[in-house]
């Protein structure tokens, strides 16, 4: 595939999906809707995925992919905000600009990023803040994702702090603004710009040009994207083109209106009474997803069934994943991997059991992190109008035959 003519080879398929019932009781959640079928059409560099829209591309990873610590690039979810995505990017002429309150403004090529700065890697989960949004009742605004608006990859690039050190920050520098190359179809629609305070910067924040040992897939932000481990993906700007350093916070739609939850203890509200004060979603909460078996799968009575899945949080690290086969009355520990991929990565888990009765069997998974945070039951999660940060105990129901 020629990157310079990417979308000429992309299939043009109409599509957007919304599911759920707005007449259901408010302020409740249930399990995300994960029984959607994959599309019959694949985008370049991608296998067929669950598709919500082709422009902008909105693609979800099927549940069965989440049995390994790294998500294959061609099965990694895709989320764009604007329909106008560049179709011509020449890696030989591409540069990223660094400007604003710096001692020297920079234009850095991809080759310079790869040869003039220390190369680093970080393995981290990328998750949309609206992942599992279809669990909220009534329907919350936005794409009605199931559990697959996420993935984990090893990202390679250079530290953002090294770039800023090279440019030289002026004394009154406080904020870093990031702009990608996607554009709105309507001129009054705000650009997708994110801001990061200097206090939020650490050595794990990088500008990545590789994903799982390959160039970034076009749909995942080629040729360069911002990586902020532990945070939701709305801050991971794709097709990064410009970095501007300022001394004042710039009010922006995607910072001040979108991607926010109520600023109260439960982060909740009701459709009738919206919260008067909100806050950015930022850090991910603890969560797990069962990749095998999937809902509706048939398993043999008295056979050894190995439940497998992934668990993660914002970087504190996963301590345990617990499995229940009796509706949450009792729990048993699953086996975790060695955690060598680091605290921002998935930890895979597995649990073996032998079903002894025919009929339906529900398997539940609950992750607990190293500071004691754990996934709640559905009924303990309250509604927010954006449908953000759902992390209810995961369930799959199978048939024992």
Image: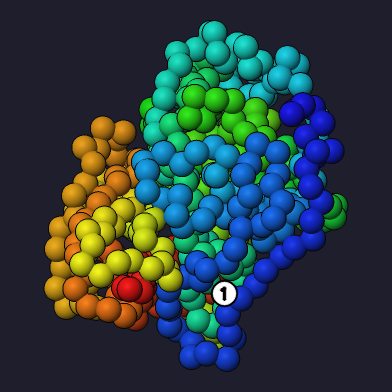
Q: Position of residue 20 (x, y in %)?
A: 58, 80
Q: Say which residue appears at 70% left-offset and 38% top-offset.
A: 44
Q: Say which residue appears at 57% left-offset and 55% top-offset.
A: 60
Quadrant housing the C terminus: bottom left
Quadrant housing the N terminus: top right
- For residue 249, side relative to residue 289 (left or right): right
Q: Position of residue 335 (x, y in %)?
A: 18, 49
User: Which residue sits furthest top?
Assistant: 116
Number of disc labels: 1
- Splitting the image into 4 quarters, where does residue 334 fall? bottom left
Q: Looking at the picture, does residue 122 appear above or below residue 55?
A: above
Q: Looking at the picture, does residue 226 appear above or below residue 354?
A: above
Report whether residue 180 is seen. Answer: no
Q: Say which residue appears at 84% left-offset and 38% top-offset.
A: 8
Reading the image, the residue beneath label 1 is 140
- For residue 107, side relative to residue 14 (left or right): left
Report whether residue 59 is seen. Answer: yes
- For residue 265, side relative to residue 89 (left or right): left
Front one among 131 and 255: 131
Q: Position of residue 275 (x, y in %)?
A: 49, 77
Q: Looking at the picture, does residue 279 appear above or below residue 319?
A: below
Front one among 151 and 241: 151
- Splitting the image into 4 quarters, where does residue 143 fall? bottom right
Front one among 321 and 260: 321
Q: Residues within 10 Å of mark 1 (few under 14, many from 20)?
A: many
Say which element carries label 1: loop
Front one among 377 and 203: 377
Q: Say which residue appears at 37% left-offset and 43% top-offset.
A: 68
């Amino acid at each position: 595939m020629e990157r310079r003519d990417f979308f000429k080879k992309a299939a043009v398929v109409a599509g957007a999906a919304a599911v759920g019932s707005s007449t259901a009781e408010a302020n409740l959640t249930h399990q995300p809707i994960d029984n959607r079928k994959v599309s019959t059409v694949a985008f370049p560099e991608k296998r067929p995925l669950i598709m919500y829209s082709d422009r902008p591309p909105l693609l979800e990873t099927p549940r069965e992919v989440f049995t390994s610590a790294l998500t294959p690039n061609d099965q990694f979810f895709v989320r764009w905000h604007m329909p106008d995505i560049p179709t011509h990017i020449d890696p030989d002429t591409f540069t990223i600009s660094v400007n604003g309150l710096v001692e020297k403004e920079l234009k850095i090529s991809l080759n310079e990023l790869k040869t003039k700065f220390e190369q680093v890697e970080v393995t981290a989960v990328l998750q949309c803040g609206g992942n599992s949004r279809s669990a909220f009742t009534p329907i919350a605004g936005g794409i009605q994702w199931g559990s697959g608006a996420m993935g984990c990859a090893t990202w390679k690039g250079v530290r953002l702090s090294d770039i800023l050190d090279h440019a030289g920050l002026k004394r009154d520098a406080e904020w870093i603004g990031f702009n990608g190359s996607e554009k709105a179809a309507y001129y009054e629609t705000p650009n997708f710009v994110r801001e990061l305070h200097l206090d939020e910067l650490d050595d794990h924040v990088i500008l990545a040009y590789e994903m799982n040992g390959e160039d970034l897939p076009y749909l995942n932000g080629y040729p360069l994207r911002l990586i902020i481990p532990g945070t939701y993906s709305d801050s991971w700007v794709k097709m990064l083109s410009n970095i501007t350093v300022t001394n004042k916070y710039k009010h922006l739609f995607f910072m001040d209106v979108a991607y926010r939850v109520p600023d109260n203890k439960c982060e909740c509200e009701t459709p009738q009474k919206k919260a008067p004060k909100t806050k950015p979603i930022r850090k991910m909460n603890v969560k797990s997803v069962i990749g095998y078996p999937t809902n509706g799968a048939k398993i043999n009575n008295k056979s050894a069934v190995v439940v497998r899945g992934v668990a993660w949080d914002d970087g504190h690290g996963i301590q345990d994943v617990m499995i229940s086969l009796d509706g949450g009355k009792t729990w048993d520990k699953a086996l975790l991997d060695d955690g060598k991929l680091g605290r921002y990565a998935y930890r895979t888990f597995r649990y073996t059991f032998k079903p002894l009765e025919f009929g339906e069997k529900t398997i539940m998974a609950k992750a607990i992190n190293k500071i004691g945070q754990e996934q709640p039951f559905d009924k303990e999660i309250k509604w927010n109008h954006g449908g953000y940060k759902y992390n209810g105990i995961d369930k799959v129901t199978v048939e024992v035959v």
